[in-house]
């Protein structure tokens, strides 16, 4: 896909959370190399938008596409393939606590049809090096700090070389110093690989320290801030 073709393109889309409409008339376009924030108060719909990109939350009306997948009426059998095309990072890491770091990563690869053992080992080594955890491959998650666990989660999100990483409050459980490390890592992946990153956050300090496009969710809508000076006035 060339850089002029959007990786994600939503036009006049409504998004539900369960039976409730949470976002109305969303227009959102994401390109290769974009670094985007979805921000707003708790309950404003930002996580619902992120989940809609991986077909976890249903979308209605308008048009909605992620890569080659049309999300309006997407068939259930297509959803696993859609989800392989995006990497997801969660606030609470969601690692398998009874498996080592290496086993966590191997599980994902085997679950997504990787079969060649040498290729699996090479890919695990590559992503652990990328996140700076080469020496932690055989540690259990409980032996790692919160920041290290999130780095494993980021490594997991990179395994299938996604064009987009979706990060849901990736620093929400971390202290300020560790937050800097995680955001620096996401920025590096974005800059060096061209991987687009969409981050949900209510931490407005990140918006100026790690610049990107900013969408504010409020009153069932989500719109992009064009004037950087408006960011200063955000109060969540």
Image: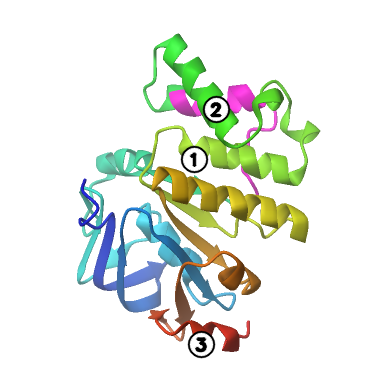
Q: Which residues are magenta?
A: 91-109
Is the residue 95 above or below the residue 137 in the image? below
Nearer the N terminus, badge 3 or badge 1? Answer: 1
Is the residue 157 above or below the residue 71 in the image? above
- Percent across and percent down for residue 42 are 59, 75
Left or right position of 135 against 233: right
Q: CA distance from mark 3 to mark 2?
A: 41 Å
Q: Which mark is residue 157?
A: 1
Q: Which residue is mark 3?
A: 230
Residue 234 found in image quarter? bottom right
Is the residue 116 above or below the residue 33 in the image? above
Left or right position of 130 against 82: right
Q: Secondary structure at mark 1?
A: helix
- Residue 91: in sight, yes or no? no
Q: Label 3: how many residues lie within 10 Å, few (<14), some (14-19) or many (20+)?
A: few
User: Which residue is the extreme one toward the front?
Assistant: 192
Left or right position of 114 against 187: left
Q: Label 1: how many residues lie within 10 Å, few (<14), some (14-19) or many (20+)?
A: many
Q: Which mark is residue 105?
A: 2
Left or right position of 69 against 47: left
Closer to the observer: label 3 or label 2? 3
- Residue 142: in sight, yes or no? yes
- Percent across and percent down for residue 91 are 62, 54
Q: Point out the image quarter for the N terminus.
A: top left
Nearer the N terminus, badge 2 or badge 1? Answer: 2
- Percent across and percent down for residue 188 are 53, 48
Q: Residue at x 49, y 40 (%)?
A: 157
Q: Label 2: how many residues lie within 10 Å, few (<14), some (14-19) or many (20+)?
A: many
Q: Secondary structure at mark 3?
A: helix
């Amino acid at each position: 896909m060339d850089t002029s073709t959007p990786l994600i393109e939503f036009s006049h889309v409504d998004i539900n959370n369960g039976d409730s409409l949470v976002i109305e008339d969303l227009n959102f376009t994401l390109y290769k190399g974009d670094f985007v924030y979805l921000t707003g108060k708790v309950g404003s719909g930002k996580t619902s938008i992120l989940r809609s990109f991986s077909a976890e939350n249903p979308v209605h009306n308008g048009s909605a596409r992620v890569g080659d997948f049309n999300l309006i009426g997407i068939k259930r059998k297509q959803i696993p393939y859609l989800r392989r095309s995006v990497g997801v990072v969660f606030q609470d890491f969601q690692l398998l606590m009874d498996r080592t770091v290496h086993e966590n990563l191997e599980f994902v690869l085997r679950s997504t049809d990787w079969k060649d053992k040498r290729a699996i080992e090479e890919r695990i080594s590559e992503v652990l090096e990328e996140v700076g955890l080469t020496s932690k491959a055989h540690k259990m998650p409980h032996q790692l700090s919160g920041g290290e666990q999130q780095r494993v989660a980021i490594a997991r999100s990179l395994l299938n070389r996604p064009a987009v990483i979706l990060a849901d409050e990736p620093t929400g459980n971390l202290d300020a110093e560790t937050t800097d490390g995680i955001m620096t890592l996401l920025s590096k992946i974005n800059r060096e690989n061209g991987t687009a990153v969409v981050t949900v956050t209510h931490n407005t300090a990140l918006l100026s320290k790690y610049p990107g496009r900013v969408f504010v969710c409020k009153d069932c809508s989500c719109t992009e801030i064009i004037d950087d000076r408006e960011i200063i006035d955000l109060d969540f």
